[in-house]
Image: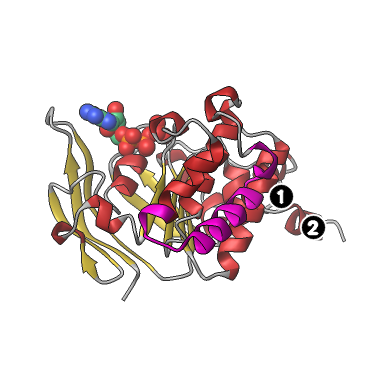
Amino acid sequence: MGIIEFKDVSFQYPNGFSAVENVSFEINEGEAIAIIGQNGAGKTTTVKMINRLLKPTHGTVLIDGMDTKDYTTAQLSKIAGYVFQNPDDQIFHNNVEDEIRFGPKKQGLSEEEIVKKTEWAAKLCGLSEQMQENPYNLPLSIRKFVSIASVLAMDDKILILDEPTAGQDLIGIKRLENILTELKKENKTVVTITHDMEFAVNNFKKIFVMSHKNLLRVGNAKEIFSDDELLKESMLKKTYIGDLCDKLNLNETAVTIEEFLKYFV
Ligand SMILES: Nc1ncnc2c1ncn2[C@@H]1O[C@H](COP(=O)(O)OP(=O)(O)OP(=O)(O)O)[C@@H](O)[C@H]1O
């Protein structure tokens, strides 16, 4: 049994717009999944159903064996932490430390545990020197890390990240990669929406492709990015390495630099 299971799940917004239709999948504990797909494919709507930020209009969502319809978002958030696409939808304290402490404090942990988890999350997110800052005095890219740290500090089994790479520079991307590595070591389950194909290829063994309200394909980077038909149908761009392979008329598409270089040795 997966730690996240979607069984024939659909969602319609209150205005009647159908954003997700009959999606089924299973994610195992400890897996890291990237969800890619064009704007409006239904990615955010799908992940918001994991902890019932949105309630499915059809089908069943199970997390850690619990049918989410029997629980509130607050209860489910103890298992699945959600980092919003826009940190400003999430941050409500006027200093970074209080923002990060909020989750573990709400979980009723001892002061010692709260401090430990807060410092760990702040360090991973590069915020140790900015604990007394008002998050709204920090740039958006750093505020994003404040929102990530505040969810990391809750130490949930599942972490959902909506577009963590948006607006990040190289240091931010490296920091995210380091966070993913740490979470892997702790056997956490991570679901990340991204428009950054290189980030998906370099950090995720399993990729979900969403298109037109559906989960179109699940595969590894090689399977996804060497399938021209799939990329066309889902309106996804190739990786830079994939483009280069095409330009060089190579028969095969490499997805990493290492793989690409093998063609020349
Ligand atoms: N509150 C809402 N009411 C009605 N329609 C909505 C609402 N929120 C989103 N939608 C529509 O649902 C569809 C799916 O949106 P969703 O945000 O899940 O897509 P996405 O794949 O995450 O896109 P993006 O990459 O742009 O974030 C879109 O067409 C969007 O316009």
Q: Amino acid at mark 1?
A: Leu
Viewer-closest of 252 and 81: 81
Camera-nearest residue between 220 and 103: 103
Say which residue appears at 37% left-offset and 46% top-offset. 210
Q: Is residue 81 above or below residue 213?
A: below
Q: Which residue is mark 1?
A: 250
Q: What's the residue at 77%, 58% (across, down)?
A: 258
Q: Position of residue 4 (x, y in %)?
A: 33, 64
Q: Amino acid at mark 2?
A: Tyr
Q: Is residue 47 visible?
A: yes
Specify the label residue 263 is tagged with: 2
**Residue 124: in magenta span:** yes
Q: Quadrant of residue 75?
A: bottom left
User: Which segment did they paint magenta?
Assistant: 105-130
Q: Ligand 1 within 8 A of label 2's CB? A: no
Q: Quadrant of ligand 1?
A: top left
Q: Tell which circle, 1 or 2, labels the residue nearer the N-terminal end.
A: 1
Between the residue at mark 1 and the residue at mark 2, the CA separation in whole angstroms equals 9 Å
Provide the secondary structure element on which disc 2 rests.
loop
